[in-house]
Each structure stands twice: as C-alpha cells, then as structure tokens.
C-alpha cells in the first residue's frame, strides 16, 4: 500500500527537480561558475560601491508625522 504512494511521489519529486534544473539552464544560472570562485581570490582596489536604489524602495524608515 505504501508503495502506491511513495513511488508516484518520488517520481513527481524527480520531475520537479529535473524541471528546476532545465529552468536554471534556460535562465543562464550556470553561465559563469568559475568566475565567482576566481573573483573572490583576486585583490581589488577598494570596497564595491553600493547599488543605487529608487527612492522609497527597500527603505526601512517610515514617516510617522
């Protein structure tokens, strides 16, 4: 009885994982796997500049007037 549940469940989970892998391939998630590993070892001139954000996006302050 449990095999009637576990076998289809394991096949479904495998297909979901396979679908996630193909999604990652299509969306260039594996574009440059060695670049990040090498970039952390190379020295750079200084700290990276923070990204510019649009006004009001991601701010933690609230106006309580």
Image (cartoon, helix red, strand yellow):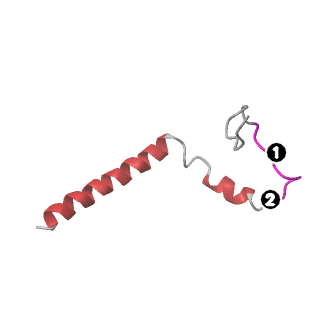
Q: Earlier in the sequence, mark 2 or mark 1?
A: 2
CA gap, disc 2 and disc 1: 17 Å
Q: Residue at x 72, y 32 (%)?
A: 54
Residue at the far top in the pictured view: 55
Q: Is residue 10 left or right of residue 59?
A: left
- For the point 85% across and 54% down, the residue is 44
Q: Which mark is residue 42?
A: 2
SS at mark 1? loop
x%, y% of residue 55?
73, 31
**Label 2 secondary element:** loop
Q: Is 65 on the left-hand or right-hand side of 19?
A: right
State the predominant SS element of the stretch in magenta: loop
Residue 49: which numbered mark, if any? 1
* Quadrant placement of the C terminus: top right
- Between 63 and 52, the one lying in front of the other is 63
Q: Which residues are magenta?
A: 42-52
Q: Name which quarter of the figure residue 60 lies in.
A: top right
Quarter of the N terminus within the rendering:
bottom left
Which residue does the image show at 58% across and 46% down from the upper left? 31
Q: Residue furthest front?
A: 65
């Amino acid at each position: 009885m449990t095999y009637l549940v576990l076998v289809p469940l394991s096949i479904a989970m495998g297909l979901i994982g396979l679908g996630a892998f193909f999604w990652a391939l299509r969306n260039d998630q594996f574009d440059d796997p060695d670049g990040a590993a090498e970039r952390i070892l190379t020295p750079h001139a200084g700290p990276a500049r923070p990204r510019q954000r649009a006004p009001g996006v991601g701010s933690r302050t609230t106006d309580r007037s």
